[in-house]
Amino acid sequence: MDEPFSIALARPLLTVTFREPQRVLSWSMLLPGMQVVRRIAWLEVRNADLPADVDAFDVISGRIRDAGLNDAVVLVTSRDIRRNHFSHVRVEDTQARCLTTVGLSNSERVGARLHRPPPFTGTINTLVHVDHPLSDGALIEAMSIATEARTAAVLDADVRRGGLAVTGTGTDCIAIAAPMDGETIHYAGKHTALGEAIGTAVYRATAEGIADWKTDYAEFSDAAQVHIAR
């Protein structure tokens, strides 16, 4: 079966290009909200790229403009984008694909914000693609399922900061993409086949990404007051 998108990696960019335009819902810094696009891009940045005296939006938008990706929904990460993870899950007549990059260095527990971010950054940036058009309500519900699955994977990894189990990072972003042609799905909750596919795909890819991050960043855990369970 033909994949609905291709993936191109050329640091500092990881770019997904869809065969057809997709409806995408996200809170991306660039092109947030509901958009119709053919491309999603991860931009890898470092602390040195975004010193305190520069406007992060100007730097990021400039790099995206220079790369010719003004038409893309953009996810920004300090994670090495070569360490991306993909999962494809089919449940009944629905399919979900997840591509994510995972870092937990600037992790937080929801509702318990720590006011001293660590001296290096990391985040979880996730694309979920489903194979059916979704109503507005189903897109929002799919976003909820993807967020819950990501959080479940983080909690199961038992990463702690400041003595608290973290639930994500301060700069996570999720994009949900769905085709525009075909039979529209109106529900994507946990009782549905699509909700199961989304949840499984996101959980698997996120869990694999966390495992890689634990291996790569264990030496930095003390500096960030992050406890990594083994």
Image (tube, rainbow, N blue to C red):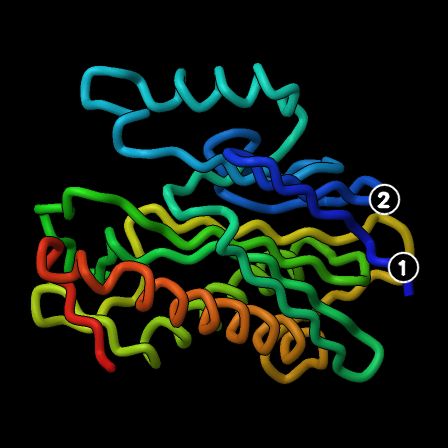
Determine whether 156 is above or below 65 in the image.
below
CA neighbours of label 1 inside 10 A, class few (<14), some (14 to 19), many (20+): few
Distance in Å between CA atoms under marks 2 and 1: 10 Å
Residue 196 lies left or right of residue 85; in this view the side is: right
Q: Nearer the viewer, mark 2 or mark 1?
A: 1
Q: Quadrant of the N terminus?
A: bottom right
Who's the residue at 89% across and 62% down the image? 183
Q: Amino acid at mark 1?
A: Asp
Residue 31 lies left or right of residue 16; in this view the side is: left
Disc with the residue nearer the chain's start (2 vs 1): 1
Residue 61 lies left or right of residue 141; in this view the side is: left
Residue 158 lies left or right of residue 1; in this view the side is: left
Who's the residue at 80% across and 57% down the image? 133
Q: Secondary structure at mark 1?
A: loop
Q: Quadrant of residue 111?
A: bottom left
> For mark 2, what is the residue?
19
Q: Quadrant of residue 214?
A: bottom left
Q: Which mark is residue 2?
A: 1
Q: Amino acid at mark 2?
A: Arg
Counting the numbered discs, the total is 2
From the viewer's side, name the closer residue of 195 and 70: 70
Determine whether 230 is above or below 209 in the image.
below
Residue 92, position in %: x, y?
A: 81, 84
Tag 2 and tag 1, C-beta contact below 8 Å: yes
Determine whether 34 is above or below 150 in the image.
above
From the viewer's side, name the closer residue of 203 and 86: 86
Who's the residue at 45% across and 65% down the image? 209
Residue 91, position in %: x, y?
A: 75, 82
